[in-house]
Amino acid sequence: MKLALLTIGDEILIGQIVDTNSAWISKKLNEIGVKVKKILSIADSADEIKWAVNLLMSENDIVLVTGGLGPTKDDITKTVLCEIFNTKLVFNQEVLDNVNELLGKRNVPVNNNNYNQAMIPENAKILLNKKGTAPAMLFEKNNSYLISMPGVPFEMKHITETYVIPFIKEKFKTNNIFHKTLVTFGIAESVLAEMLENVENSMPDYMKLAYLPTPGYIRLRLSIYDYKSEYQDKVDEVLEEIKKVLGNKLLAEDDLKPEIIIGNLLSKQGKTISTAESCTGGRIASLLTSIAGSSKYFYGSVVAYDNSIKENILNISSEDLEKYGAVSQQVVEQMAKGVLELLKTDYAISTSGIAGPDGGTIEKPVGTVWIGIASKTKTISRKFSFFNDREINIQRATNTALALMIEFLRVEENSG
Amino acid sequence: MKLALLTIGDEILIGQIVDTNSAWISKKLNEIGVKVKKILSIADSADEIKWAVNLLMSENDIVLVTGGLGPTKDDITKTVLCEIFNTKLVFNQEVLDNVNELLGKRNVPVNNNNYNQAMIPENAKILLNKKGTAPAMLFEKNNSYLISMPGVPFEMKHITETYVIPFIKEKFKTNNIFHKTLVTFGIAESVLAEMLENVENSMPDYMKLAYLPTPGYIRLRLSIYDYKSEYQDKVDEVLEEIKKVLGNKLLAEDDLKPEIIIGNLLSKQGKTISTAESCTGGRIASLLTSIAGSSKYFYGSVVAYDNSIKENILNISSEDLEKYGAVSQQVVEQMAKGVLELLKTDYAISTSGIAGPDGGTIEKPVGTVWIGIASKTKTISRKFSFFNDREINIQRATNTALALMIEFLRVEENSG
């Protein structure tokens, strides 16, 4: 089957926003065995929309359209689709009920603009949007389908997961795709590629190994785009070889974020955690608390950005702060122990580093980061040199701290 | 003049990377008065490349191509361009010298793959790439131009700035583009559209108003794609009218993130800030510290997720916690005052809410969030009902808290 994405919105063509929707949809489709043929972005212009829809529908089985469905004047997708599919707008009570329910919850009055959102192309099938006021719409023409979705990312994701993926699975025979992801950390991509060269050379042609780097860790994805059950022995063999090469740098055998792995380990052990963050500025806490149910094991954090906070709240020795500096083994270990005692948790993570762009010295250049981990009986720390931009340094420090915590929890689990 | 972007690479179509190049180029072009007509992404496939180049060149004056110029065998753009422009590869000494120089600096040995990079289509003009081994190339056909650039972001940026922008300025008369962005918060998009209906109806055809929503705030962009100086009076008039309608819901008159606006206000006033976060879990702190130089005004935070932290560290009255619950005006105000005193800052932000998916009650459903702001002399708080997913509730609470802080700082500034 052939599928194309069409993104509508001036904001993309003038570079005001980056089109993250297309990457997200492409990835989701890939997981069910569909490779996107083309991604096209055009302006909020009737002529452009007509041209693009006709072109893409003539050569694809499905065209997924995002954007241009908002309640405001600049959003013209719906009326242009009416022209293309030779239909007219009719009132839809179900859509208005949904708008009423959503806005009612937020105490926002329903107005004419919202009423217009309940006007729907007569020959479209409505895909009700439970996350927003603009419904998605399914059209058919000459055996080709078009689904028009809002461009707001969380609404688009909801529509894709609820309607688009099931629709494609039902209507089309997709390949049997096999994906297995291993998460590894602490190895540069080029070094990892060298370590895995022999394994990759021994892999049969139907297997593909992809490297998906994130600041701080790398996901390795083994894929087979036309999987057959007789491949399974070889798959198991290759995965075993990869795991042997990775050794203790293997963080997870599933595509799980580090903050989820930590949550699972803590829940299993019935233990609690806190953080004392300097250069990561609350990023670790905000990742840990992004997980539903984290209040069971995450107690809190002290973001100790200014040295006075390190001293007064976390009880760091002022002599050590002076003698070794805030970015030091001595201080980061005291931070971990300090927050553990203060917030009365079983484990604690601490960070202290120079995120940049300023604050670096010859001895401690921008990107130098100390990470500490404490339990009631043990404190460890490690130094890292990231040497990136501020944002990437913060991300790497955050993910590396989470990876170290996972390693620490696994050791505790095995020794306990 | 008409211009389109073409991105070549499987990694985009399987969602492995987000196409940030196109947004960057579009923004740069917009600054010199060129609005990109289309952005198209296709796979590393000869057929797709031929189809796309022919299509885009037939309807544009310039096509900018990125990707597929690397030294490995999956990069086929150059050979396909030879077919399209009916030419052959010839050796180019200048390109090889550049490759030798670049790799020599990095102590990387030059191999056969690199030698192949000095093979250049005979009828292309070489645009030497000082940042990488693959040169950019300029082709012409039927009065339409094509420039092929590497996809590596910093190489692409170098080529765009050094060759593409000057080439366009020299060859074409470009429009004068006008953009003005206003940031507003606390108004639903549909309500905002209604408030601005009269202004929009009175706008001349050459003006366009776009709504760009983010959880917690909306950016409004007024654009004129063929700006003339005689429009300026009308522009000023329309902007004044919009600002009058927005009133104190106008967060910024430039396209600035709230965390930058706060940083600017605090720096200007020479004041400091801290946060006490429950439902936002450190998100506010991590946004504030994402800004370079934030250590001058941001002191730290207490992420008080567990009630024991609210009680023991932030000194919240245990009776109030019991009587009113953690998500209450009483507690959120004590949190703001508590962290202000504890961390000795001039201002403090606090949050307490039910992010979900669990923890909601009939009286306090998921999405209920209290936000507090304290200065040394004043404490305010407000209740919000977001009713979204956990992640969006957290984002809205975070952005709304920043917006309230901006409002508070402006009042302080005007009264001080």
Image (spheres, coloured by chain):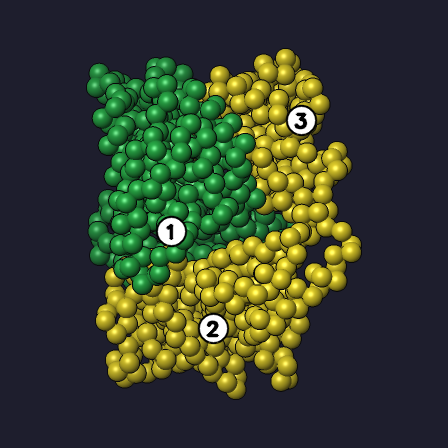
Chain colours: A yellow, B green
Which residue type does callout 3 highlight?
Answer: Tyr
Label 1 sits on residue: B114
Secondary structure at badge 1 equals helix
Q: In the rendering, at what x and y percent does residue A20 appear? A: 49, 42
Looking at numbered disc 1 in the image, what kind of residue is underneath it? Asn
Mark 3 secondary-structure assignment: strand
Q: Which residue is mark 2?
A: A349
- Residue at 53% over, 56% down: A211
Given this view, does label 3 or label 1 mark the residue nearer the observer? 1
Circle 2: residue type: Ile
Q: Residue at image x 53%, y 32%?
A: B48
Q: Nearer the viewer, residue A301 or A29?
A: A29
x then y, percent, for residue A123 = 69, 18
- Where residue B128 sits, quadrant-wise, is top left
Query: Mark 3 belongs to which subunit?
Result: A
Q: Is residue B174 above or below residue A102?
A: above
State which mark lies toward you, 3 or 2.
3
